[in-house]
Image: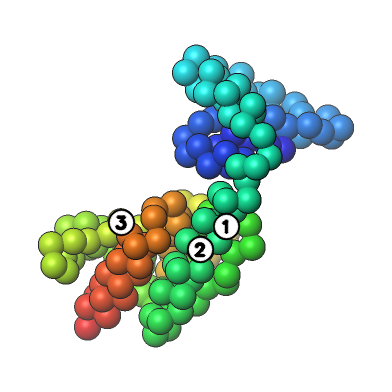
Amino acid sequence: MDSISKRYSACGARIGCLATRNKDVRAAAVRMAQGRLCPPVVEQTAALAMTKLGPSIFSPMRDEYMRRRDITFEGLQRIPGLICEKPKGAFYIMAELPIPDCEAFARWLLTDFSHEGETLMVAPGPGFYVQDETLGMPKGLNQIRLAYVLEVPKLQRAMDLLARAVDQYQG
């Protein structure tokens, strides 16, 4: 499986491929693909141009994402009670906060929290899990997903804001 959005850091570009010998996986993928419209012409044109860039673009891109990951991870580690693992290939971190309901926390960030005129937006964890009511408590209820797609100084500021927000929300 491969995609333009992940390979070239082209967020939102929904062009990719899947190769499998598994007939069930292929049938499911075909059903999914038939339920969607084709990618816009501009995305197809951009994807073609990206494939001509060559392999030299990947090292600087990888190094930049590693810097972004490390800054985000280090900032999260300074928040008391927060639990997360350092990603080895993702563009995001799933972080377990010392907060019982991260959906309520995410709403609060946007409606009530501000420090020096700024706030931040997080993605609540439950939306990234398949939920099964028979297992009881929803998965990811106390987790957030943080994509480290911004520049390092902005990520540093975001981690500072998050630490302040968690502290204030708990208090």
Determine whether, in the image, residue 163 is placed left or right of residue 85: left
Residue topped by disc 3: 121
Q: Position of residue 70 (x, y in %)?
A: 51, 68
At x 57% / y 72%, what residue is drawn? 85
Residue topped by disc 1: 63
Determine the CA span between mark 3 and mark 2.
21 Å
Determine whether, in the image, residue 42 is placed left or right of residue 155: right
For disc 3, the neighbor class at 10 Å (few under 14, some 14 to 19, many from 20) is some
Q: Position of residue 165 (x, y in %)?
A: 26, 72
Amino acid at dot 3 = Met
At x 22% / y 61%, what residue is drawn? 119
Residue 122 or 54: which is nearer the viewer? 54
Amino acid at dot 2 = Arg
Q: Secondary structure at mark 3?
A: loop
**The quadrant where residue 6 appears:** top right
Q: Earlier in the sequence, mark 3 or mark 1?
A: 1
Q: Earlier in the sequence, mark 3 or mark 2?
A: 2
Residue topped by disc 2: 67
